[in-house]
Every structure is written in C-alpha cells, then in structure tokens.
Amino acid sequence: MLQLLLFQLSATLAYHPNASFLYVPAGLSVALLLLLGGRALPIVLCCSAATTLVNASTLGPAANPVLAILLFLGIPLAHAVPYWAGVSVLQRTTPGEFDPRNPTHVLRFLIIIPIAAAGAAFLGVIVLYLLGGVPFAQAQDLFAAWWIGDTVAAVCLSIAIAYLYLLVLEWFGADLGCRFVNEDDVHPKRLPLRDLLYLPLAWLLFLVSASLAYRYPEKLGLSFPVYAMVIALLWTIYKARSPIVYVVLAVMTVTLAYAASVFGLIASAAEYQIAMIAVGSISYFTNAAVSSQRKALAHSEQVNKRLLSEIRQKESLQAHAELLQFRSGRDYLTGAMNRAFFEEALHTQYHRRVRNGHRHCLAFVDVNDFKQVNDRFGYHAGDEALKAIARILMARSRKGDVVARHGGDMFVVILPEVANAREADAIISRWKREVAGQRIQAYPELSLSISVGRAFFPGASDCTTQMSMRSISAGRSFSPGSSESETEMSILQAAVQDMYQDKARMKTSK
C-alpha cells in the first residue's frame, strides 16, 4: 500500500509519460534493503509488481499475453535487482551495521546508491525497448530521466523512510533483526516533540523563499528556495541529535519537487534534481561529521570522567594509606608518636646531627604520682591525664620536634637545634607551668605535675654518669629497644637520670 501511495505521489510530479521528477518508490526500496538486506528482495519485487500491474498501460486487455507476462516480470526485476546488488555491496564493504552517522558509511552510500539507480534505470529502459516497443531515442531520454529521478529519491528519502519504518516496527513491538544503526550513546532513536518543531520551521523558511521566487521568477527561480532548504537543514543538523534531520530532508525534497512542478520548471528539471542530490549529500555528510564529533566528545568526556574517578580513587587510597601509616606511628590513647617511631627518629636525628656537627636535646617526661591518680580517681582519670599532658607537649612543640609516648606515664621529646641548658630549661619550664594549670573537667580535684630530664647529644654521655637500664625498667617500667646502639642508649639513660634528679629536687622544694 505504501508503494502504491508513493507511486501516486511520483505520478503527481510527472513531467514525462513514463518518468517523474522524483520517483519516490526508489527511496522505499533502498530503505527496505538497508533494513533487511537480502530478505527485502521479495518484498521489493512484489511492490514493484503491484505498481506495474496497476499502472502499466502495456498490460491492458489488448496486450500480447506473452509480452505482458514478460513485462510484468521484467520491470520489477529491473527495478529490484540493481538496488539489491548495490545495497549488498554497500553492506559487504561496510564493517558492521550501516550507520548513517558514520562519515565512511555515508560516503560509500553516496557512491554506490547512484550507481545502483543507474543500473535500475538502464535495465528498465532495456525492458521497455525490447518488450514495450519504446523507440531507442525515447529510451535514451528515459534513461537519464529515470536515473536522476531514482537517485534523488534513493539518496534523499531512503534514510528517513528507514527511520520511520523502524519507529513503526517498534510501535507494533516487532523485531525483524534490522541491520541498521538507528541510535547510539549520543543520538536517540526517538523524535522528541521539540525536535518536531524543526519541520514546520523549515517549511516556513522554504515557503517564504518560495514566495519570493514566485514573485521574481526570472531573478530568483528555485535557487533561493534551495538556499533556504540548505540553511534549514544545516540549522537542524547543528541543533538536533535525533533523526529529525533525515525527515526534514525528505519533506523538503518532496516540497521542492512539488514547487518545481507548480512553477512549471520542467525544462530545468535536471538542474533542480541535481541540486537536491547535492543538498542531500551535503546534509548526510555534514550530519555524519557532526555526529562523529559529538560521539568523540562524549567518549572523551567519559574517558576524562573515568580518569578523574581513577585519580580520585588513587588519591583516596593514598590518603587512606597515609592515614594508616600515620596511625601506625601514633600512640592510640594520646595521639602522640609511639615508641617505635621515637626510636627510629632518635637514630635518624643522632646520625644526622653527628654528620652535620649540630647538637640537640632529648627530654624525658614523667608524670608525678601517676599511680596515686589511678588509685584515687580510677584508670579513666589516668587516661584523661595522659591525654591532657600529651596535648600540651604537642601544642607547645615546634616544627621538627618529636613528641612520643615511651610507655606507661612516660613521654620523650626530641628538640632539634636546642644545644644548651638555658634553651631547654625555658621550654621545660613552660611545659611544667601549663601542666600544673591544667584541669580535667570530669575530675576538678585532680592536679597534675611532671618531672623532666634532659640530655644533649652528641656528647651527652660525657657529662652524665651511667645508670643501669635494668633498674630503671624495674622501677619505672622503662627499657630501651634492643635496636638502639650503645650511644643512643646512653642518651636515654642520661635523660632518665636527669629526670630522677628533677623529681628529687621537686620533693626537696616541697
């Protein structure tokens, strides 16, 4: 039925007894072959046979039955076989399914389909010449007319018909396994309502230009409407991503053909036909190029998002690793560095200062009467006291200082570039004042104090006496790590001894 309707449309635009300005059924044939491949050949043959049976005057009652049968078979074969062959070549030379938004596919389409149209026109006039009694000179004229008329429809209408056919199939819920790309990640297959507005806008622009051409036919002719048609199509390509561009091209092509018939421009028919083929080719290729750029940009955005996501994931993992590393070097209760970190820092600082010739101070901090705090107020109070003291030591530390919990109620602080007793005593006095003024909100009666010993290195062991680490460990839960060298151990011993002396001085002063 669609074939017959399109044939009648072509007959309306007739400018030759056996040809038309635009042979619309050629677009339907190419569309079906693009969608279904070789499976569409019987359909195209049946459609062509139907139009031949209904419209061919040579098949009347007075016709020779043999010639009539040969014409009835020959004309559909002459029309269907070349297009089937052309679309088969197109699909074989095109990787994957045919995609009208792929510039390579479009370029091959624009080369192969006009050749197929030439084959259909040539076989058609041969059939008419041999079986229909058409004179050779007239057959030559028919070839040019058929070829151009078929090419206009096959190029400008077939893609639109294919899309609309797919929409109808989807509406009926039919899946025929069509070998045709009608959507991708960037371009939808449906026609949004806003995109449908491009059709009346294109029509309006064409009608305005056609009105001017009709008013000044000698100056403008149809050149101005063709220009308006190009502008409308380029604007649609630029703004829309749906298949509306193919629909606009098809409608504008039929409209231009009708306008040419109305204006009586039959003598210049070939010029306008070629103009329509050029407009359709430019529209297809421009749309394919723009679509490829859109897909490339979309792919680039996806890659950028994926890379950004990976970068953020790596940053998150790195931050988590740094947090784990940070926590692995921290004392869980107080937030100060732990003993393992301190021992490594002391080893590093000692050898660095020895090489540079600088001296710095190691302070050993002990909480006075800590056992009584636990016994009187409970272990929670003792924990809060250790946290408060650690906060004070860390808050008053300088950049580069190392504050660590050595164990129990003991802290150690490495003070780089503090090379004499006056500087060290100033820092230690500030610690003692702030600890003495510290009050824990949950235990207002709890008062705190610390004893601090200090030792300077290199050379700390020369100004202090040795003290057995075993007795310190037994009395104060203190034992240096086995990884410490004798020199580093002597620094700790000197600081511990000085701490006990400070504790003794505080008891004496009381």
Image (tube, rainbow, N blue to C red):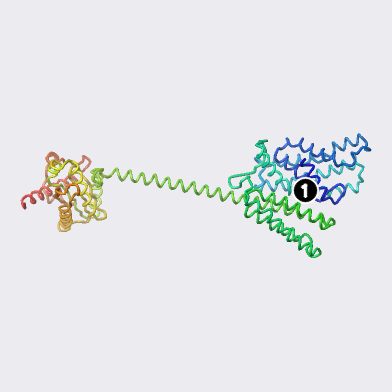
In the rendered image, residue 263, in percent from the top left (x then y), is placed at 82, 58
In the rendered image, residue 13, in percent from the top left (x then y), is placed at 82, 51
Q: Which SS class for mark 1?
A: helix
435 or 176: nearer the eye? Answer: 176
Q: Which residue is mark 1?
A: 151
105 or 269: nearer the eye? Answer: 269
51 or 338: nearer the eye? Answer: 51
Q: Relative to residue 309, is residue 177 drawn left or right?
A: right
Q: Is residue 433 visible?
A: yes
Q: Amino acid at mark 1?
A: Thr
In the rendered image, residue 176, in percent from the top left (x then y), is placed at 68, 35
Q: Residues within 10 Å of mark 1 (few under 14, many from 20)?
A: many
In the rendered image, residue 319, in percent from the top left (x then y), is placed at 37, 47
103 or 385: nearer the eye? Answer: 385
Q: Relative to residue 440, is residue 60 drawn left or right?
A: right
The quarter of the picture where the N terminus appears is top right
Q: Residue at x 36, y 44 (%)?
A: 320
Q: Is residue 130 visible?
A: no
Instruction: Tell me if residue 377 comes above or below residue 277 in the rendering.
Output: above
Q: Relative to residue 163, is residue 364 drawn left or right?
A: left
Q: Residue at x 80, y 63 (%)?
A: 217
Q: Quadrant of residue 279?
A: bottom right
